[in-house]
Amino acid sequence: MKARKWLSNSKEVLEAIPEGKRAKELELNESELPSVKTLELMWKAESDVFVFRGPGRSIENMTKRNILSKIATLFDPLGFILPVIISAKIMLQELWTLGVSWDELVPQNVANGVADWLSGLQNLQKLEVPRCIKSTNDKDQQINTFVDASNDTYAAVVYLRSSDGEQKTVRLIASKTRVAPLKSVSISRLELMAAMLGLQITISIVTVLNYDIKEVTFWSDSIDVLWWARGRS
């Protein structure tokens, strides 16, 4: 199986790729490079940023099946828009607890919440996330992982803080979140679960980046978690 449909933000790189293996939208004679997308996630090669195109504003039949289908159109493997997606997952969890079947119309209060969520998705088009997280001049590389939790969800987000001596840059690398279990769990326990999630995603990122990372710092506002992490047990 040979990889095809290559696209790069460098025309020099693209010229070295056989024409039959380039993206179909690509014309090197044009002034700007094209944009390509997977589901609703688009990469603008010219400006080298990720942007999102929100799905349609409405659902014809407000059923659990159609709501899940709409959520699935938001392709976000690195968690750039997790605050948006987790809101929908919380509403979906509520439908499970209510025992709503797949093709049954959802209660009106949930339908109103989903409608508001869909309307807000149009704001995603204003969001641009730089693809590159590191400059060739950066020397000091630091990973900072923040974790937090609430009654509804717990999450972790990882940033790369880099410096070239004079200018400091902070870039979002990735984030993950989980809906809180239906079984009653204390906030302290959820904070600990967030810390575990943060540790897992940070280990994966440091392994993949394979740079000379000077420092990794974990941040939590839970005193309980900070003491548990120091405890031998």
Image (tube, helix red, strand yellow):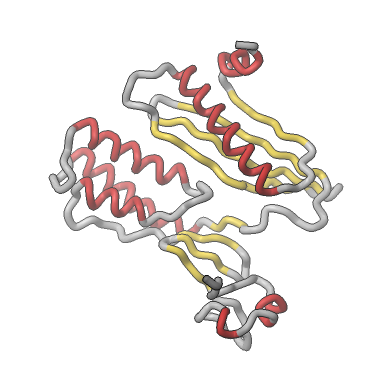
Q: What is the number of callouts on the image?
A: 0
Please state, as top left, top right, bottom left or bottom right, where the C terminus lies in the image.
top right
Location of residue 204 by image quarter: top right
Q: Is residue 18 above or below residue 84?
A: below
Q: Position of residue 16 (x, y in %)?
A: 69, 80
Q: Which residue is drawn at the image coordinates 57% and 35% (left, top)?
A: 200
Towards the viewer: 172 or 1 = 1
Q: Is residue 95 left or right of residue 88?
A: left
Q: Which residue is drawn at the image coordinates 49% and 58% (left, top)?
A: 126
Q: Is residue 211 above or below residue 98?
A: below
Towards the viewer: 135 or 112 = 135
Extreme-right residue of the structure: 165
Q: Position of residue 159 (x, y in %)?
A: 64, 42
Location of residue 22 by image quarter: bottom right
Q: Which residue is drawn at the image coordinates 50% and 70% (left, top)?
A: 36
Q: Position of residue 209 (x, y in %)?
A: 69, 48
Extreme-bottom residue of the structure: 29
Extreme-left residue of the structure: 104
Q: Position of residue 50 (x, y in %)?
A: 55, 60
Q: Is residue 70 left or right of residue 173?
A: left
Q: Is residue 135 left or right of residue 77?
A: right
Extreme-front residue of the structure: 1
Q: Which residue is drawn at the image coordinates 54% and 74% (left, top)?
A: 4
Location of residue 47 by image quarter: bottom right
